[in-house]
Image: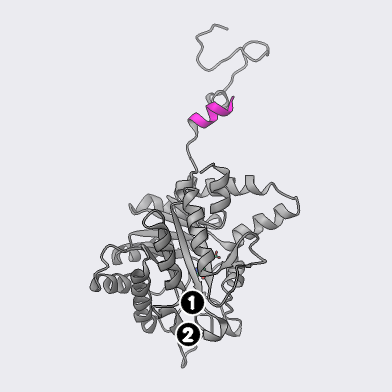
């Protein structure tokens, strides 16, 4: 076997002449693997979801999301600082009212001194422009029936058009409080357009919109609803306004609508069960694409790791890498802090 046959090697103690593929050669050492890696997960890809609750004296752990807490305004501010120091570029804030403050229209969400607005202002003051502050723009945490908008009493269904002005007002209050990015997650038709108009009309042309564009009615949101203290009334669900998990093409139509209405970035949610959708959206649109590795995806890894059934940190990295490989530009994940520490951010 001559030395110049390109795809044959004679090394590593074997008898001469067996074929070795280029792929195998480039997998031989950690440094080679690092050099030729197609996908790189970095701290720059991470967005940390954070909960801030009204009426707490101290942070309260969320049992179904180990490592995640409901924060006070002070503790969420400290956490945004800590994450920023680790190199995490962005957080997304979810405000939670006192249970007794929930009502049919989620009116508490809109107050300039509401819990989300307070947290945004406090974090903004603490970190300046060094961390991107996103605000989840939805009403389910604030409504007593747990739906993402107002419910039409005659049909018992969410009233899309009656909800839009509330989202617009909520978004504006979040922008005034200091949000860089408004992230409408309620899947109402027209929500991006009405929020864009409200922001522009009030001089917030520079505030960006991250649309939860392809958001599926998923069973993986359970732990989030524990964290956010959301129960949908009468055993209801969101299948009338969130997407059906059987549908792939529909996601493209949803994203096209949101981009057409002015979304600056779009999101696919959940992440791992919708990698095909992430890849489709990446291929068809030029805006940045985020993916939300949701509460159930996180909780499953944590629960199995606690039992010693899987290597939790390794699975977390593998999953987040898969989401990037599918085409996501950034990932909302409860692993953000942990992964930033592991990556040495
Ligand atoms: C709605 C909202 C939800 C999540 C983010 N925004 C819950 C829902 O649609 O029921 C879920 C996130 C997660 O599971 O981590 N405000």
Counting from the top left corner in percent of width and height, residue 42 is at: 48, 44
Counting from the top left corner in percent of width and height, residue 26 is at: 54, 25
Q: Residue at x 34, y 81 (%)?
A: 165
Name the image colouring: one colour
Q: Helix, strand or loop at disc 1? A: loop
242 falls in the magenta region: no
Q: Which residue is mark 2?
A: 157
Q: Earlier in the sequence, mark 1 or mark 2?
A: 2
> Which mark identifies residue 240?
1
Q: Residue at x 57, y 80 (%)?
A: 232
* Main secondary structure found in the magenta portion: helix
Vertically, is 50 above or below 240? Answer: above
Q: Are marks 1 and 2 in contact (CB under 8 Å)?
A: yes
Residue 244 versus residue 161: which sits nearer the camera?
161
Left or right: 196 as drawn, with respect to 79:
left
Measured in 3D between alpha carbons, the distance from the residue under mark 1 to the one under mark 2, in whole angstroms, is 8 Å
In the picture as drawn, the residue positioned furthest to the bottom comes out as 154
Q: Is residue 190 visible?
A: no
Q: Is mark 1 within 8 Å of ligand 1?
A: no
User: What's the magenta region?
Assistant: 28-35
Q: Helix, strand or loop at disc 2? A: strand
Q: Residues within 10 Å of mark 2 (few under 14, many from 20)?
A: some
33 falls in the magenta region: yes
Q: Residues within 10 Å of mark 1 (few under 14, many from 20)?
A: few
């Amino acid at each position: 076997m001559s030395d110049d046959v390109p795809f044959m090697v004679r090394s590593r103690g074997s008898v001469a002449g067996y074929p070795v593929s280029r792929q195998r050669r480039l997998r031989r050492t950690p440094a080679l693997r690092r050099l030729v890696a197609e996908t790189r997960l970095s701290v720059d890809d991470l967005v940390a979801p954070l909960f801030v609750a009204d009426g707490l004296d101290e942070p309260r752990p969320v049992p179904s999301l180990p490592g995640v807490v409901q924060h006070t305004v002070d503790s969420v501010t400290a956490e945004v600082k800590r994450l920023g120091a680790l190199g995490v570029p962005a957080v997304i804030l979810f405000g939670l009212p006192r249970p007794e403050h929930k009502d049919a229209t989620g009116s508490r969400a809109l107050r300039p001194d509401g819990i989300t607005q307070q947290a945004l202002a406090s974090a903004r003051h603490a970190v300046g422009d060094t961390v991107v502050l996103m605000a989840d723009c939805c009403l389910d945490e604030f409504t007593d029936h747990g739906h993402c908008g107002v419910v039409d009493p005659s049909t018992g269904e969410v009233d899309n058009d009656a909800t839009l002005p509330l989202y617009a007002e909520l978004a504006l209050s979040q922008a005034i409080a200091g949000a860089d990015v408004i992230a409408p997650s309620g899947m109402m038709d027209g929500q991006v357009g009405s929020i864009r108009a409200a922001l522009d009309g009030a001089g917030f042309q520079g505030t960006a919109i991250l649309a939860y564009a392809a958001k599926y009615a998923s069973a993986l949101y359970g732990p989030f609803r524990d964290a956010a203290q959301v129960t949908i009334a009468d055993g209801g669900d969101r299948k009338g306004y969130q997407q059906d998990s059987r549908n792939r093409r529909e996601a493209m139509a949803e994203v096209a609508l949101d981009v057409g209405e002015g979304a600056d970035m779009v999101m696919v949610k959940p992440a791992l069960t919708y990698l095909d959708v992430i890849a489709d959206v990446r291929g068809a649109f030029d805006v940045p694409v985020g993916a939300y590795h949701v509460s159930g995806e996180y909780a499953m890894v944590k629960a199995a790791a606690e039992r010693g059934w899987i290597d939790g940190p390794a699975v977390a990295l593998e999953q987040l890498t898969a989401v990037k490989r599918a085409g996501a530009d950034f990932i909302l994940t409860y692993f953000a802090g942990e992964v930033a520490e592991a990556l040495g951010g």
